[in-house]
Amino acid sequence: MTERWPFWAGGLALAGVMLLHWLTVHRMMSVSSRFSAVVDRVRWGRAEPVEALSPEELREALLAATQAEAGVGVPAPPASLPVPQEGIRPPQPVSTHLLFLGGLGVGGLLGATLSGTFSVTTLLRSSELEALAGGSGPGQAALLVGGGALVGFGTRMAGGCTSGHGLCGVSRLQPGSLLATAAFFGVGVAVSFALAGLT
Amino acid sequence: MREKVFVALVAVALGFSLNRIGFSSWDEVHAMFLFSDLRLFLTFASAVGFLAVAWIAVRRVSRPRWAPRPIHRGTVLGGALFGLGWAIAGACPAVALVQIGEGQLGALFTLGGVLLGNLVYSVVHERWLRWDTARCDT
């Protein structure tokens, strides 16, 4: 075990990173939303930039999106209703999302290298996970794919993960974030005790 | 371009911090969930505390437009499924990438799973659910 940061230093670092993201990128940090954006880009292709649309096209696109979300029975808004021009922020391009996700890997590489713990292993470096998988490589891979799929499904369903809900939402006392965070920490504790009973 | 530089720097700082805290270690995450080592819980709680103070300061000097994060029908079930996956794979979405950077190539399976689960939910949502999950990044 290598020397870890004391809790207050780790807390300061995480809070600093979230604050820095808001101050420089002007968006709340949300890692799971970036995954969603990458997945949507693969599914739907490149989105037309908002600036390139006429007000009529924008109105039609907003109506289509509303109907996709709320059902096709939603009537079109009257033509006199102004299309909102302000407050629509163009989404970041997929290259920015990939840069962020790649940056996380570079950060992990830096941390491991500077602390002298870098090494390449085909599986996770965890004696407990190894025991859980019965010492089998394919077993561990199956656990990781299955666990990862639950993480991807659940974070998109809840609309956030540890960064967006857990840190940025809870620190602003947002009700959805408080409840989602209680749910994922609560279930994480319960399942970990169950897994510890298995091994 | 400026935004891309900031995004990259923040991401590297987050990945580095998660590694140095130990959030990217399956065993240490489980020591947290089993209450056998409270350091990660305290790290998380103190980060929330520091951030709460930071947001108060931000509100003092500007009027940020933050999207509210209301409770919706996917909040509890989505959070619970995420907690289940986190306990099994030992990774939240960011950590899967940090683990790959550390040379723990098994996390490529986790990353594939996260992308797959995200894709499956987007299809399920469109076909059957269609509730507003709100967004984190505004």
Image (cartoon, coloured by chain):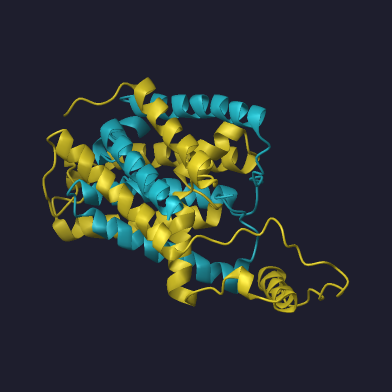
Chain colours: A yellow, B cyan
Picture quadrant where residue A84 is located: bottom right
- Give the residue drawn at x 53%, y 57%: A157
- Rendering coords of residue A123 (x, y %): 16, 52
In the image, is residue A7 above or below residue B77? above
Number of marks present in the image shown: 0
Picture quadrant where residue A180 is located: top right
- Rendering coords of residue B96 (x, y %): 31, 50
Tell me the quadrant of the picture where the N terminus of chain B can be found: bottom left
- Rendering coords of residue A156 (x, y %): 50, 57
- Give the residue drawn at x 65%, y 51%: B72
In the image, is residue A98 above or below residue A174? below
Q: Nearer the viewer, residue B4 or A65?
A: B4
Q: Is residue A58 left or right of residue A94?
A: right
- Rendering coords of residue B82 (x, y %): 45, 50
Does residue B35 show up?
no
- Give the residue drawn at x 42%, y 73%: A42
Q: Is residue A71 left or right of residue B87?
A: right
Q: Nearer the viewer, residue B51 or A194?
A: B51
Q: Is residue A9 left or right of residue B60?
A: left
In the image, is residue A21 above or below residue A88? above
Does residue A102 show up?
yes
Q: Nearer the viewer, residue B128 or A34?
A: A34
Q: Nearer the viewer, residue A126 or B47?
A: B47
